[in-house]
Image (cartoon, rainbow, N blue to C red):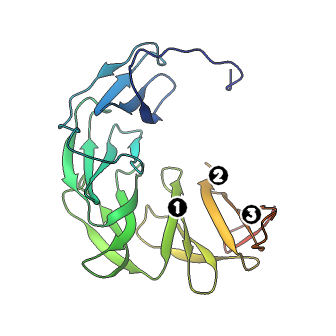
Amino acid sequence: DGGNTWENNRNIAGYESHIHCYNSESCILYANDTLYKTTDKGLTWNPVSHPDLSQYDSFYYSKLKINKNGNGIFTASKNYEETLFTTSDFGNTWENKALIQDGGLITILDNDNIISLGYSYESDSYESSISTDGGDSWTSTTLNHDIYAIHDNGRYVAALCTTRANYVVLCSSDYGQTWITNEFSEPLYFADNIFVTPENIVYSFGSTSNAFNFEPRGYRSYNNISCFDVI
């Protein structure tokens, strides 16, 4: 009912930290070094097949997502090194792949491209990396921005970034192949969060003030997302 009422259907002991629902009845959940799946709107949860996750020490920044084709990603960290797990059967089985960037932000799109944005110690720069074969190989390009957050609607991707002068939003309308830098309509002291609607409208919020009692402002894109104006 749109979130108006809730029921406790929990049958998993312990702490659940990540969940992703890829249709109205099916979800994948991580808890206690195990991935669980439901296909009955959360009434029952069953563990799925995956490599041993107990060796990893951090899932705080993990990404868990399955696209409409049944291909998905899950990340875990050990000693500050990221590991990428992938699935091609709606989360029933998983295998591990290596990430290019350390601590990168990652997503999978509707055409099965996996995009990872983050800092590469090898090149000493921020990079955008794309895999078109499920994480087996990657193509990387250098980005001149620090990257804070990403969001996508399956095709359109937006990344909230900083430069020495201001916050900017990098946008890609071709599954991450190319990126366009877009400015906010005013200089910001800080910006946080990014969201892409199904209609390719991008939202973010920030503030022009560094005062303790600042009032954050909402921003949204217009037309061809060449600039972000105050809502």
Q: Where is residue 114 in the image (x, y as percent from the top left)?
A: 34, 56
Q: Which residue is drawn at 19% across and 47% down?
A: 96
Q: Residue 125, percent across and down?
A: 36, 81
Query: Gap in Å between the C-alphas at discs 3 and 1?
Result: 15 Å
Depth check, mark 3 against mark 1: the one in front is 1
Q: Mark 2 points at which residue?
A: 199
What secondary structure is marked by label 2?
Answer: loop
Is residue 156 visible in the rendered image? The answer is no
Give the amino acid type for the residue marked by disc 1 in the picture. Answer: Ala
Question: If the image is split into quadrants, where does the N terminus sit?
Answer: top right
Name of the residue lying farthest toward the bottom:
165
Depicted 101 relative to depicted 189: above or below? above
Residue position for label 1: 149
State whether residue 200 is above or below residue 147: above
- List x then y, in percent, for residue 97: 20, 52
Quarter of the rendering containing residue 32: top left
Q: Which of marks 3 and 2 is nearer the N terminus?
A: 2
Name the residue: 42% across, 38% down: 68
Report the side of 146 relative to 87 (left or right).
right
Residue at (30, 33) in percent of width and height? 91
Residue 141 disc label: none
Residue identified by numbered label 3 = 219
Q: Quadrant of residue 53?
A: top left
Residue at 39% of width from left, 68% of height from top?
A: 118
